[in-house]
Image (spheres, rainbow, N blue to C red):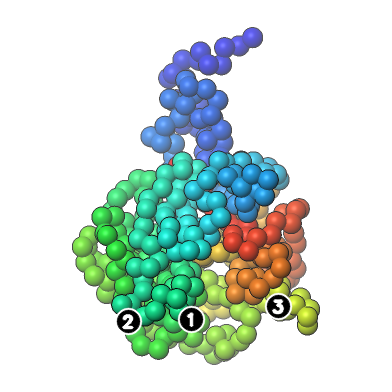
């Protein structure tokens, strides 16, 4: 029998360097001690494209674990011990693969890398309450709803975390490593609540429910944010329609707005189902919106806390080009459902509007329905 554990270290390093998929790299790392020493972060190409994994809700039998469904394997490919995510809402920062986790009581807010279990403690939600506000009235009002990182904390301490909370209005805050508390700020006046945020070409961008596009710039490591607001030229009145969600996504260095439209499943239910998507390329100077009908080889993933795009040619036969893979993101409606959210998932064809299933099971949760996570070391 071959002694796989006794393979030369240099050969193991050479093999590790050729593994481009993080979930395979993690599996390589778990074989034995000699393989683990060969599969360090330095031996992985962090710039290689990664396919999002679908993070499923708590395992009800043992909710210290989280399962991750792989589109490439067509099954649950990872089951990770994650007590740090137990009973927590999880907001993926789609571009870097970390999660912001928060407990319902507001006491615990953290950044978490689910694949390394590295955790960074953040100020709690009570720090977001103004001195003249009553805690009892605000304990649900201040929940964080969006969280975006400027860089991957696995590789640098020079990053900024921006959050939107109490998203019916314009409440924003940022945090840097070393900060004791949240640094609250606002942009513009009467711009409405935040629908989505993204870090794009060195700046934070946000879109509000009223159609304002906010641009936030941090010039230096200790700077306060400079901001600008432009109002999108909404000729189709997208931002006046009910049952819509808006996302910002970087596709081939262009900033796109993704509009998601839903309808009630039945007159007796508050549950929504997605019926179509529309795409618009944004002019961040003039506020113009150019409608797009084709993504080419690109594929978009949308869900809780935002969207990301991938070149489908790097995953031929696994994901479909010119499609949008979506998870259930109707938070306000799902909160009132008996079993929570998770039903509204599918793969939307931009060419003909058809919706297909990509996940064969049904995973429901009030706290954290299935959502996309980019694997990260």
Give whichever of discs 2 and 3 has the lower sequence position: 2
The x, y position of residue 333, in whole percent, is 64, 75
| Residue drawn at point x = 38 percent, y = 46 percent | 154
* Horizontal side, residue 214 vs residue 356: left or right: left
Give whichever of discs 1 and 3 has the lower sequence position: 1
Q: Count up the numbered dots.
A: 3
Q: Nearer the viewer, mark 2 or mark 1?
A: 2
The x, y position of residue 66, in whole percent, is 60, 47
Callout 1: 10 Å neighbours few (<14), some, many (20+)? some
Residue 247 in view in this figure: yes
Are the two marked residues, 2 and 3, in contact with CB atoms closer than 8 angstroms? no
Dot label at residue 168: 1
The local secondary structure at tag 3 comes to: loop
- For the C terminus, the quadrant is top left
- For the N terminus, the quadrant is top right
Are the two marked residues, 1 and 3, in contact with CB atoms closer than 8 angstroms? no
Callout 3: 10 Å neighbours few (<14), some, many (20+)? some
Instruction: Quote the CA–CA distance across marks 1 and 3.
Output: 19 Å
Give whichever of discs 2 and 1 has the lower sequence position: 2
The local secondary structure at tag 1 comes to: loop
Name the one closer to the observer, 162 or 298.
Answer: 162
Callout 2: 10 Å neighbours few (<14), some, many (20+)? few
Dot label at residue 270: 3
Residue 358 in view in this figure: no
| Residue drawn at point x = 41 percent, y = 47 percent | 119
Q: Kindly indicate the quadrant of the structure image that contains residue 42.
A: top left
Instruction: Quote the CA–CA distance across marks 2 and 3.
Output: 35 Å
Q: Which residue is mark 2?
A: 132
| Residue drawn at point x = 36 percent, y = 57 percent | 122
| Residue drawn at point x = 57 percent, y = 85 percent | 238
């Amino acid at each position: 029998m071959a002694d796989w554990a006794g393979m030369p270290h240099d050969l193991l390093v050479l093999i590790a360097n050729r593994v481009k998929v993080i979930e395979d790299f993690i599996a390589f790392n778990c074989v034995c001690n000699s393989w683990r020493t060969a599969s360090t972060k330095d031996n992985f190409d962090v710039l290689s494209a990664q396919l999002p994994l679908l993070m499923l809700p708590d395992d009800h039998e043992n909710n210290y674990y989280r399962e991750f469904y792989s589109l490439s394997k067509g099954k649950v490919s990872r089951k990770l011990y994650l007590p740090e995510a137990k009973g927590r809402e999880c907001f993926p920062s789609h571009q870097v693969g970390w999660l912001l986790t928060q407990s319902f009581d507001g006491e615990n807010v953290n950044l978490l890398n689910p694949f390394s279990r590295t955790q960074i403690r953040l100020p709690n939600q009570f720090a977001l309450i103004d001195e003249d506000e009553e805690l009892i009235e605000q304990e649900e009002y201040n929940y964080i709803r969006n969280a975006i990182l400027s860089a991957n904390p696995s590789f640098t301490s020079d990053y900024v975390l921006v959050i939107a909370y109490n998203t019916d209005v314009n409440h924003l805050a940022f945090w840097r490593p070393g900060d004791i508390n949240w640094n609250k700020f606002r942009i513009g006046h009467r711009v409405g609540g935040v629908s989505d945020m993204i870090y794009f070409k060195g700046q934070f961008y946000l879109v509000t429910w009223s159609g304002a596009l906010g641009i936030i710039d941090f010039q230096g490591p200790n700077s306060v944010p400079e901001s600008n607001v432009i109002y999108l030229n909404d000729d189709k009145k997208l931002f006046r329609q009910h049952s819509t969600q808006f996302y910002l996504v970087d596709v081939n260095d262009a900033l796109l707005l993704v509009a998601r439209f839903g309808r009630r499943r039945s007159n007796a239910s508050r549950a929504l189902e997605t019926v179509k998507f529309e795409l618009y390329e944004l002019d961040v100077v003039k506020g113009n919106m150019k409608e797009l009908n084709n993504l080419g080889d690109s594929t978009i993933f949308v869900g809780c806390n935002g969207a990301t795009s991938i070149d489908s040619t790097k995953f031929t036969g696994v994901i479909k080009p010119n499609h949008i893979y979506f998870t259930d993101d109707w938070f306000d409606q799902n909160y009132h459902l008996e079993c929570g959210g998770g039903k509204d998932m599918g793969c939307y064809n931009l060419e003909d509007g058809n919706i297909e299933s990509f996940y064969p099971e049904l995973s429901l949760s009030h706290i954290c329905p299935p959502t996309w996570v980019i694997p990260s070391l």
